[in-house]
Amino acid sequence: MFTGIITALGSVRAIDPIGDGKDMRLEIATPWPDTASIALGASIACSGCCLTAVAVNADSFAVDASAETLACTTLGSWAVGTRVNLERSLKIGDELGGHMVSGHADGVGKAVSATAENGLTRWRFKVPRPLARFIAVKGSVAVNGVSLTVNEVKDDMFGVNVIPHTASVTGFGMMRPGDKVNIEIDMLARYVARLAETT
């Protein structure tokens, strides 16, 4: 489990095919000073996708991504140099500053626009229609692993406000309209919807 509070901005250092080439191993460079504390098998959220550390070096770690993960998230379009929002898994007793995030992306959305608003930036995103019904004003959503509060919803689009600090410590500072993003809907919304379907 994660909180959606990004603790480092890493970058893809290497991408190597595994087996028949459908799966990939990604080496991700990180500014974390304590990579030695990353245990093999640890879960790390990489731009919103929970991946397992399979190797750890002094300033990087490696993860394996299956063909399904590559096809269902933005990971399939990553290249060497791609910036990656990083968050290590939540420990009991840690501050829950964002919201409960599983790291299981529900789909891929697209950044539509970025508009300056009173020192902030209003980002608007388009999501696959099956996900739109789970996104509500004042609810939570994770965009590339970043916990955000929904400020507006219209059909299959929603808007969030991004403060300068968030833009400076996450990939939002480099995001452009048209970019694809990993979307994870609020866990509570998912379960409430499932409960409504079965009652």
Image: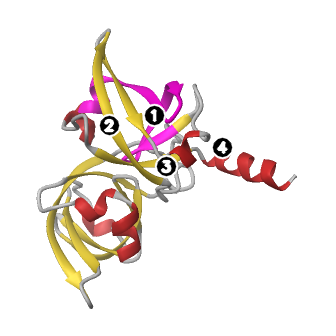
State the residue position of label 1: 148
Under tag 3, what secondary structure? strand
Distance from the alpha carbon under mark 4 to that under mark 1: 15 Å
Distance from the alpha carbon under mark 3 to that under mark 2: 14 Å
Q: How far across and how far down the image is residue 48, in percent?
A: 40, 53
Q: Are marks 4 and 2 in contact (CB under 8 Å)?
A: no
State the residue position of label 3: 184
State the residue position of label 2: 111
Under tag 2, what secondary structure? strand
Q: Residues within 10 Å of mark 2 (few under 14, many from 20)?
A: many
Magenta: main secondary structure equals strand
Residue at 16% over, 63% down: 59
Q: How far across and how far down the image is residue 106, in percent?
A: 50, 55
Q: Amino acid at mark 1?
A: Leu
Distance from the alpha carbon under mark 4 to that under mark 2: 22 Å
Residue at 35% over, 44% down: 6
Q: Are marks 1 and 2 in contact (CB under 8 Å)?
A: no
Q: Is residue 163 magenta?
A: yes
Q: Which residues are magenta?
A: 141-167
Label whose residue precedes the other's in the sequence (1 or 2): 2
Q: Residues within 10 Å of mark 1 (few under 14, many from 20)?
A: many
Residue at 41% over, 72% down: 68
Q: Amino acid at mark 3?
A: Glu
Distance from the alpha carbon under mark 4 to that under mark 3: 11 Å
Q: Residues within 10 Å of mark 3 (few under 14, many from 20)?
A: many
Residue 189 tag number: 4
Residue at 44% over, 47% down: 183
Label whose residue precedes the other's in the sequence (3 or 2): 2
Q: Nearer the viewer, residue 61 or 94?
A: 61
Q: Are marks 4 and 3 in contact (CB under 8 Å)?
A: no
Distance from the alpha carbon under mark 1 to that under mark 3: 11 Å
